[in-house]
Image (cartoon, grey):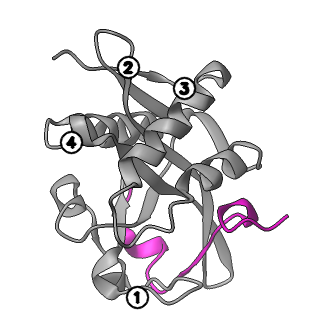
Amino acid sequence: MEIKLRQENPSDYIEVAKAIIDAYEAVPYSNHKEQDMVARLRESDAFIPQLSILAHDEHGTIAGHVLLTRIEIANKGEIHKALALAPLSIRPAYQNKGVGTQLVLESHRIAKSMGCNFIVILGIANYYPRFGYQLASKYDIKFPFKIADANALVIALNEDYSAITGGTVIYSKGFFGEN
């Protein structure tokens, strides 16, 4: 199976939504509204088209999708631009075949080339460290809601963590469905 990656475009939105629904259908901790969050974020000022990436097979079937959007980390009176990776969606038939790895690494490559320094994720603690993610609590980074320490992760792409150590993550309103 050959998987190719490309930037999502508006004609993909319906099929990407179906892929997201498929990916989270059997996930017990999901609210099953990830596709709605993606739709809101596409309409927000947090959206960066180059960081909405899909994976498709040789037949054009969408295997997965990843979205990184703008956030900020406030620290010591300064605002640091950062990204949130959410969601990473892999259809069940394509899971455990490296599709997620390809999407995460490509999103990191593009983000880094755009000068983005930090990415945060609320994710699976035993999956994301393979890409260099570390516990946000290690750097005393706070989130605006309660999250298990093991699931709040951060990675520095272009610089060290010193600028954001002790900071607070600020998500765009679109992330939570606010106008």
Q: Earlier in the sequence, mark 1 or mark 4?
A: 4
Considering depth in this image, is 23 or 146 the residue closer to the camera? Answer: 23
Distance in Å between CA atoms under marks 3 and 1: 34 Å
Label 4 belongs to which residue?
Answer: 95
Label 2 belongs to which residue?
Answer: 61
Q: Is disc 3 placed on a helix, strand or loop?
A: loop
| Label 4 neighbour load within 10 Å: few <14, some 14-19, many 20+ | some
Tell me the amino acid under the disc marked 3.
Answer: Glu
Distance in Å between CA atoms under marks 2 and 1: 41 Å
Locate residue 99, reporting x and y percent: 24, 35
Considering depth in this image, is 26 or 96 the residue closer to the camera? Answer: 26
Label 3 belongs to which residue?
Answer: 8
Residue 94 part of the magenta segment? no
Which numbered mark, 3 or 1, is in the foreground of this view? 3
- For the C terminus, the quadrant is bottom right
Locate residue 153, reporting x and y percent: 35, 71
Label number found at residue 140: 1
Tell me the amino acid under the disc marked 2.
Answer: Thr
Identify which residue is drawn at 44% across, 58% down. 119
Q: Earlier in the sequence, mark 3 or mark 1?
A: 3
Res 160 visible: no
In the picture, measured across the screen, residue 52 lies left or right of residue 61, that is right
Quadrant of res 107: top left
Q: Are marks 3 and 1 in contact (CB under 8 Å)?
A: no
Residues shaded magenta: 158-179
Distance in Å between CA atoms under marks 3 and 2: 13 Å
| Label 3 neighbour load within 10 Å: few <14, some 14-19, many 20+ | some
Q: Earlier in the sequence, mark 4 or mark 2?
A: 2
Which numbered mark, 3 or 4, is in the foreground of this view? 4
